[in-house]
Amino acid sequence: MTFIPLPLVIVAGGKSSRMGSDKALLPFGGFKTLTEYQLARLQPFFESLHVSTKKREKFDFDASFIEDNTTYQEHSPLVALLSILEYFKTPVCVLSVDTPFVTPEIFETLYQKMREDDDAIIATSPCSSHQLCAIYKPSILDNIRILLANNEHKIRLLLNQSHTQYTPFEKDEPFLNVNHPAEYEEAKERL
């Protein structure tokens, strides 16, 4: 049984502009929302589970919510990361709400590869790197604050300026990202 002794945060605060509606709230896998599906399937494998969001009010279920730091108005993964790391002050696993096939074993691999001087451990697959399937450490906070002070919100820029370890996985399938309606339909068929 895989168990990762770190918190996992489901990042569910994006704009979902390509989907046309909030993907965190789409029904999925017999659950009222994709967010609840992710929480239910991953809960046994992590020390604790949380949801990162701009505003907690959009969800009508109970969970541990981490709201974005209100200093920043942008929908930005960097603002979410800042808020998450300020909340925990420990290494934390993060997963985008729209990747319903990432397995606990992927996080177990990331955890096992983590070295003391890493600021971030990022999953990669043949098609891409997956910045929101990763482990981040509080040591990256200063770099996040500098970028945000310069109104920079690109996570790749952050990773380029930090001690980042990229951990390769052989297949793209677990990282299917539900961004468009067609991908949502494909994901429902894969269940």
Image: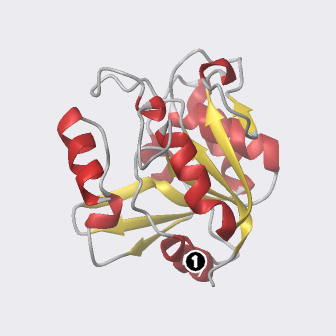
- Residue 128 or residue 50, whichever sits in front: 50
Give the left or right position of residue 53, taking residue 34 as reference: right
Residue 100, image x and y in percent?
41, 54
Specify the amino acid type for callout 1.
Answer: Glu
Q: Position of residue 170 (x, y in %)?
A: 28, 78
Identity of the residue drawn at 39% across and 61% down: 101
Nearer to me, 31 or 99? 31
Asked whether, in this view, residue 53 is left or right of residue 177, the answer is right
Tell me if mark 1 has few (under 14), some (14-19) or many (20+) residues whose alpha carbon lies within 10 angstroms of its own. some
- Residue lying furthest left in this view? 182
Q: Residue at x 27, y 65 (%)?
A: 173
**Front residue (pair 121, 39):** 39
Quadrant containing the N terminus in the rendered view: bottom right
Name the residue at 82% across, 51% down.
89
Position above or below: 109 against 40: below
Q: Position of residue 22 (x, y in %)?
A: 42, 25
Q: In the picture, residue 128 is in which quadrant?
A: bottom left
Of 27 and 93, nearer the camera is: 27
Position of 27 relative to 109 (above/below):
above
Instruction: Classify the position of the C terminus by image quarter.
Output: bottom left
Image position, residue 109 (x, y; %): 53, 79
Q: Secondary structure at mark 1?
A: helix
Which residue lies under the disc numbered 1? Answer: 108
